[in-house]
Amino acid sequence: MSTPSLSLPPTASTPAVSVTAEGRLLTRRRIRLPHRAGFWVTAVAFLVMMAFNTVPTPLYALYQQRDGFPTVMVTVIFAAYSIGVMLSLFLAGHLSDRFGRRRVILTAVVVEVVAALTFLVWSSVEGLVAARFVAGLGIGILTATATAHLADLRRLSHPTATIGFAATIAGVANMGGLALGPLIGGVFAEWIPAPLVTPYLVFLAALVAVGFAYAFVPETVVRARTRAPYRPQRVSVPRDSRTAYWAAGIGGFAAFAITGLFGSVAPTFLAQLLHQSDRFVAGVVSFSVFGAAALAQVVFAKVSTRQQIVLGVVLIVAGLLSLGAAALTVAAAPFVLGGIVAGAGVGLVFRGALATAGALAMEGSRSETTAGIFLLGFAGMTVPPLLVGVALLWVPLVPAFLGFVVLVLALILWAGPRMVRATRAA
């Protein structure tokens, strides 16, 4: 999943990633969209691919009914997705700085098409794990690259504009797509025939369509004449900035842990703890959490990065306390409200994490530095929810859930103040 998303401060360009007159000339030799139109096509492609990756969320209950696997298997399936994301981020998340944005994003589209086909032709539990893993590979290729491409296209279409608008749209596409997926999945699960087949047919068509449209988006990277040897992901930041970078990474880890919870086992909590088994309701709850993350970035787009981080941390803490109260009182209202409040905080904190890291990026390493934050974010999306799933094998639901709340609270309370100090220093 994700994210988040979202904020890349303007940096000086370098030959490997520059947007130059030569680059404009190269794009005009072929049929290409204007940079302004290309910006919106990229945003829509980003949103569709993110939505595809959360559409299974309300469908897991149907898979459980069909195959009879335990709740921990839901977290394993979800973890397969996150592991795929992290693996491709580590191996390829930075490659658009060298090979170009278009080539990398078109590769991501192809990988997502393969994932959709895997869902359709391999319907066993093993097939679910494989499909989610492949889908994660595509998202790991996509996230940092699409965020960087939107920033590039915005600079070309509006040379005097700041990077804030591109960052906001990237965040809305990322989190907004994650929000739409469960809502669409819930509609299919509750009212559409063949709910374990039809969503993937629909998204297969959508992926092909956005891939075709994106093929006409102009490239914004002028590749270097000589290529350095390939190496996996590496993040280079000044030695005296590493604490700030790690704080941003841990902040992203904590924020994405919340999205991981609502993208995997939240429907199980609704059914077992709150006795709410309606699959559309499960989709709406997940939609509300991710939608709040996207909306918060729009509402507070003009607020300074430091203020966004402060507000985001406060919202995450308040939301987590509400989730803990819901577990102790077995009440639906604080569970839903806590998820929405925490979701709004997730959007702001992860946007702030990327802004903090981007401000520390060395020249020519924007995509690479962004990929590092996404890598830590998706680790947060994987590890805490998986620990909850494993814990449910031995402990009741409420203690496992409260353990998650305490862990994420500790992480965000450690990272938040350090991120604020880093933005103040910048």
Image (tube, helix red, strand yellow):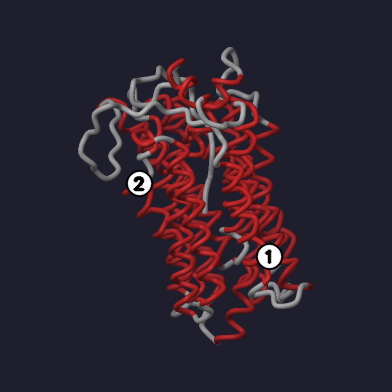
Q: Secondary structure at mark 1?
A: helix
User: Within 10 Å of the Cα at label 2, are there few (<14), some (14-19), or many (20+) other Cα atoms?
Assistant: many
Residue underneath mark 1: 185
Where is 348 relative to 394, above or below? above
- Farthest residue in the top direction? 160
Q: Amino acid at mark 1?
A: Gly
Q: Residue at x 42, y 26 (%)?
A: 422
Q: Residue at x 42, y 32 (%)?
A: 418
Is 185 positioned to the left or the right of 63 in the image? right
Camera-nearest residue between 365 and 309: 365
Quadrant housing residue 371: top left
Camera-nearest residue between 281 and 1: 1
| Image coordinates for residue 326, horizontal then vertical, percent | 66, 63
Q: Secondary structure at mark 2?
A: helix
Instruction: Give me the disc on residue 12.
Output: none
Q: Residue at x 76, y 73 (%)?
A: 192
Instruction: Answer yes or no: is residue 194 visible.
Output: yes
Q: Rounded to the nearest whole Å, what is the CA distance between mark 1 and mark 2?
A: 29 Å
Q: Residue at x 65, y 31 (%)?
A: 37
Q: Amino acid at mark 2?
A: Ala
Residue underneath mark 2: 92
Is 224 positioned to the left or the right of 37 in the image? left
Mark 1 or 2: in front is 2
Camera-nearest residue between 297 and 192: 192
| Image coordinates for residue 248, horizontal then vertical, percent | 42, 37
